[in-house]
């Protein structure tokens, strides 16, 4: 079992940056691949980015390519999502997720553990 807690969301203007954090506890963090997802009102939860257990493999969904950077610090049991050049369409609740196994994973059903989410609101 691993527990995940996101932080770092907020209200920003278009063009601003935010860094989301995902603090993990309960099990050895570097045993788990991580993913970031988001869910806007009335929409399904969608994949944003994923990072492998070691951080050596990274995968982004198209909306975040070139603007978002996913990373992790296994010594601190924390994952990060750096978001730059934010747009109003990035407004959503952002979730981090974790699962065991090698590689990266990009669907909701791939993940066993989820955080509670953090709200990101981008005004125009």
Image: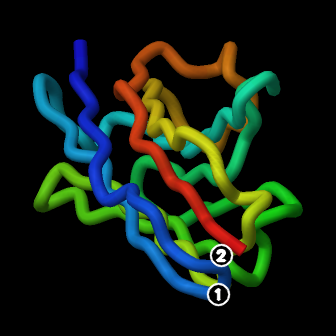
The answer to whether residue 13 is above or below residue 7 is below
The answer to whether residue 2 is above or below residue 51 is above
Residue at left offset 75%, top offset 35%: 46
Q: Earlier in the sequence, mark 1 or mark 2?
A: 1
State if disc 2 and disc 1 touch (CB < 8 Å).
Answer: yes
Q: As rendered, which of 107 and 10 lies closer to the eye?
A: 10
Q: As rendered, which of 64 and 40 lies closer to the eye?
A: 40
Q: How far apart are marks 1 and 2 (CA)?
A: 5 Å
Residue 60 quadrant = bottom right
Quadrant of the drawing holding the C terminus: bottom right
The answer to whether residue 8 is above or below residue 117 is below
Q: Position of residue 84 (x, y in %)?
A: 59, 82
Q: As rendered, which of 105 and 68 lies closer to the eye?
A: 68
Q: How crowded is mark 2: few (under 14 residues within 10 Å), some or many (20 or more)?
A: many
Residue at left offset 50%, top offset 29%: 101
Count of labels shown? 2
Q: Where is residue 49 in the image (x, y as percent from the top left)?
A: 65, 53
Q: Is label 2 in a helix, a strand or a loop?
A: loop
Q: 122 left or right of 10?
A: right
Q: 5 left or right of 57?
A: left
Q: Position of residue 44 (x, y in %)?
A: 79, 23
Residue at left offset 39%, top offset 70%: 19
Quadrant of the drawing holding the N terminus: top left
The disc at residue 86 is 2
Q: How crowded is mark 1: few (under 14 residues within 10 Å), some or many (20 or more)?
A: some
Disc 1 marks which residue? Answer: 15
Q: Where is residue 61 in the image (x, y as percent from the top left)?
A: 81, 55
Residue at left offset 41%, top offset 18%: 113
Name the residue furthest front: 124
């Amino acid at each position: 079992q691993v527990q995940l807690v996101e932080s770092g969301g907020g209200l920003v203007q278009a063009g601003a940056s935010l860094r989301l954090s995902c603090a993990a506890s309960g099990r050895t963090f570097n045993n788990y691949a991580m993913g970031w997802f988001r869910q806007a009102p009335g929409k399904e939860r969608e994949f944003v980015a994923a990072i492998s257990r070691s951080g050596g493999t990274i995968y982004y969904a198209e909306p975040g390519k070139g603007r978002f950077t996913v990373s992790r610090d296994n010594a601190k049991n924390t994952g990060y999502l750096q978001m730059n050049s934010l747009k109003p369409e990035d407004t959503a609740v952002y979730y981090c997720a974790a699962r065991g196994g090698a590689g990266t994973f990009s669907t909701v059903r791939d993940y066993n553990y989820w955080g509670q989410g953090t709200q990101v609101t981008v005004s125009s």
